[in-house]
Every structure is written in structure tokens, then in C-alpha cells.
Image: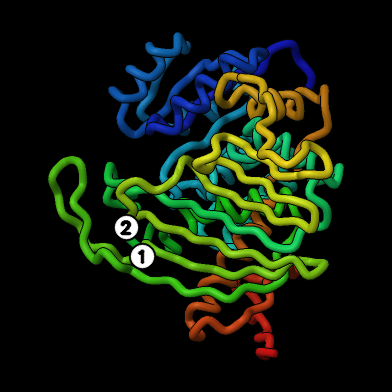
């Protein structure tokens, strides 16, 4: 598709919809013509706030409109597959909020639907577009801290107490790993490469949660996970995931340790700090990062792929790779932290192929 402006339907009116609508406005080149939500009143208020064309209580209306070229799907996780498959069949380009789906099999079905329909399918991973991450990607490629030896990443928040569905395994099968961990998995794989094997432990440490509306709900998903990763070239990493921390961290905390230095992202040293004596002398270097509106880079990148003014991304396949890591974490945890090879098979089978255990050294 090539056109001057892309007609967008925003499907979903939860808190993440604000990120997407603000990002689209900042990116330019698109007109949000419809906001859809099962709560029509909420959709109407969001449409009014962002000056969108109209609102509806039925997402299917977005797929019937010829002036809608693409959809942003930011609905609860268990609805992603149904809506994305229907959007593909309707010929709409798709930006799907992470996690792409709750299983490897569901991710593959969405990808297959988009390929069969010939539509662009992308998955939204906001963290990879942060300025400190973009600087780090370039710095690593330039050898600022030399060959990487290890990394540590944390994804931790108090948890999503605004909706009970987050704590039901029928909706979010992998709990904190789906909701927060996939961000960190995607980030480290973007920066350093594929995760080859996993050793992990998961727990439910808070068995009941009190929601913002006063209800108390049982927690039937993991709220804490610890994973060790092995990458290529001898690099190892640790990943801490929690949705029970009263303070947590700011989106993520990432520490990268190389032969010639260290990079810290979103730590007590600020947005980005680099220890590389051979480059910057015997002091922490704090790069001067540009200030860009939240979401502007992600949505500009997506729209460029939709219109054909730039190559399309590969985020759907990358989201599938991330879900393969998620499933390896759960398998390892079920085997008392056994090391489990990440299944990267291309099979379209419904069930994930058995992952081979790696014997301890």
C-alpha cells in the first residue's frame, strides 16, 4: 500500500491506547478514524481526547470500513488472536500490542493468517525504540565496551491491579513472563542475539491480589520469575521478573558487562551511563541523548513499512522467538530449573516440540 496518509482504527481503549494514539500523533502521516472498545463510553472519551473521527463498542466495525487501512490492536491478551486473524482476512495492516499471543502455536496462527492475506503484521515492543537503547545498540556494534561477557536485566513493577484478568491463567497463561518478561526478552535479543538455552524458576508469591476497585482476586499465574540465559559466543545473562514489587524499576534495568567496560541503562546512574576508560577516560560517561516524544519512533517506523516508504519490520517473527523463550522458561521451571534448549523449530504444529535438556557440566 502506498498513500499519503494511513487511515487507522484503534482497537482497545485501555491505558496502553494512550501510548499508541499519542505516538501516532507525534509520528504524523496517519489519521485515526475510529476507536473501538467493548466499553463504548470509554472509546468515545478516548476518541474525543485525541480528536479521532468516531467511536464504537464493536471492534468488527473497524474491519468493515474502507477508509481504515490499518489497525492497532491493544485489547486484553486472550483476544489478540481472534481480532488479528479477522483483521488480516479483512486486508488491514496490523500493529499488535505485546505479547503477540499466549503461546507459540497462537503466534504461528496469527503469522500464517497475515501471510495468507498478504498484509503487514508488526508487534509493538516500545523499549527497543528508547533513545538509550538505540545508543547502546550502536555502541555495542562499535565495540565501546569490547566483547560482551554477561548481562543482567530486570523487569519489575507493583503489578496490573486495574484488571482481574491479568491473574487468571485462562487469560494470561504465563503471568509475569507474558506481561513484563517479554519486554526484557525482546530487548536483550535485539541487542545481543538469540537466547539458546534457559534455566529458570517461577513462583506465585502473592496468592491473592486486591484490585483498585476493591475486589480481591486469586492469583493463578506466576508473579515472580528468575531465568538464566545462554547466548552465542559464551555470553550469559540473568533475568529477574516481578509484578509484586512496590517500587520496582523504571520500565527495565539493564546492565551490560564487556571486556573493556560497562553499560548501565535506567539505573541509579540515570538513563544511560557508560564506563569505558579507553574511550572516555576514568569516569562514567553519560551520553547526551535526544528527547523524542514517546512512541514517535515506533509508530513512524511502523507507518513507513505500511506505506512502503521503508522496509517492513520483522517484529512478528521476533515476537514468536520471544514466546519460544517464554515456553522454555516454563518448561525449565517445571523440571526444577533444568537447562532447556529454546525450541526455534519452524513447524506449524499446534504444540511446541519437546525441548531437549542440557546436562549440567
Q: Which residue appears at 68% of the width and 73% of the height?
A: 197
Q: CA distance from mark 2 to mark 1?
A: 6 Å
Say if residue 347 shows up in the picture. no
Q: Which residue appears at 68% of the width and 24% of the height?
A: 288
- Specify the quadrant that holds the N terminus: top right
Q: As rendered, which of 323 and 359 lies closer to the eye?
A: 359
Near mark 2 (Cα within 10 A), the count class, few <14, some 14-19 or many ≥20, is many
- Specify the quadrant that holds the C terminus: bottom right
Q: Which residue appears at 78% of the width and 44% of the height?
A: 277
Q: Which residue appears at 50% of the width and 47% of the height?
A: 80
Near mark 1 (Cα within 10 A), the count class, few <14, some 14-19 or many ≥20, is many
Is residue 294 found left or right of 173 in the rendered image?
right
- Is disc 2 in contact with disc 1, using a CB cutoff of under 8 Å? yes
User: Can you give x and y, in whole percent of width and height, for residue 53 in the image?
Assistant: 47, 11
Furthest toward the left, the residue is 214
Q: Residue tagged by mark 2?
A: 167
Say above or below: 333 vs 151: below
User: Can you give x and y, in whole percent of width and height, for residue 160 in the image?
Assistant: 33, 46
Counting residues from the N terminus, which is met first, the one under dot 2 or under dot 1?
2
Say if residue 290 shows up in the picture. yes
Amino acid at each position: 500500500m502506498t498513500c499519503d496518509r494511513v487511515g487507522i482504527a484503534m482497537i482497545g481503549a485501555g491505558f496502553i491506547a494512550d501510548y499508541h494514539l499519542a505516538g501516532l500523533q507525534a509520528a504524523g502521516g496517519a489519521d485515526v478514524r475510529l476507536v473501538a472498545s467493548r466499553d463504548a463510553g470509554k472509546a468515545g472519551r478516548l476518541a474525543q481526547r485525541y480528536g479521532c473521527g468516531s467511536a464504537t463498542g464493536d471492534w468488527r466495525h473497524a474491519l468493515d470500513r474502507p477508509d481504515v487501512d490499518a489497525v492497532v490492536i491493544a485489547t486484553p491478551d486472550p483476544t489478540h488472536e481472534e481480532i488479528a486473524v479477522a483483521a488480516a482476512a479483512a486486508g488491514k495492516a496490523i500493529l499488535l500490542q505485546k505479547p503477540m499471543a499466549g503461546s507459540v502455536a497462537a503466534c504461528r496462527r496469527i503469522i500464517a493468517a497475515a501471510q495468507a492475506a498478504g498484509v503487514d503484521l508488526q508487534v509493538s515492543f516500545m523499549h527497543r525504540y528508547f533513545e538509550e537503547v538505540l545508543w547502546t545498540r550502536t555502541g555495542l556494534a562499535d565495540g565501546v565496551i569490547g566483547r560482551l561477557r554477561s548481562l543482567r536485566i530486570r523487569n519489575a513493577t507493583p503489578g496490573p491491579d486495574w484488571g482481574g484478568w491479568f491473574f487468571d491463567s485462562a487469560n494470561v497463561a504465563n503471568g509475569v513472563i507474558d506481561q513484563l518478561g517479554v519486554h526484557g526478552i525482546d530487548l536483550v535479543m535485539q541487542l545481543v542475539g538469540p537466547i539458546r538455552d534457559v534455566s529458570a524458576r517461577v513462583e506465585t508469591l502473592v496468592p491473592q491480589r486486591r484490585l483498585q476497585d476493591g475486589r480481591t482476586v486469586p492469583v493463578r499465574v506466576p508473579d515472580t520469575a528468575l531465568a538464566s540465559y545462554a547466548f552465542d559466543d559464551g555470553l550469559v545473562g540473568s533475568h529477574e521478573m516481578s509484578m509484586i514489587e512496590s517500587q520496582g524499576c523504571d520500565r527495565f534495568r539493564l546492565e551490560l558487562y564487556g571486556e573493556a567496560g560497562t553499560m548501565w541503562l535506567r539505573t541509579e546512574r540515570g538513563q544511560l551511563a557508560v564506563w569505558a576508560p579507553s574511550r572516555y577516560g576514568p569516569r562514567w560517561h553519560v551520553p547526551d541523548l535526544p528527547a523524542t516524544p514517546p512512541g514517535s519512533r515506533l509508530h513512524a517506523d511502523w507507518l513507513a513499512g505500511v506505506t512502503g516508504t521503508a522496509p517492513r519490520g520483522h517484529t512478528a517473527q521476533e515476537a514468536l522467538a520471544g514466546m519460544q523463550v517464554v515456553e522454555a522458561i516454563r518448561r525449565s521451571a517445571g523440571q526444577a530449573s533444568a537447562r532447556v534448549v529454546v525450541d526455534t523449530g519452524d513447524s506449524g504444529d499446534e504444540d511446541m516440540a519437546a525441548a531437549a535438556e542440557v546436562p549440567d557440566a
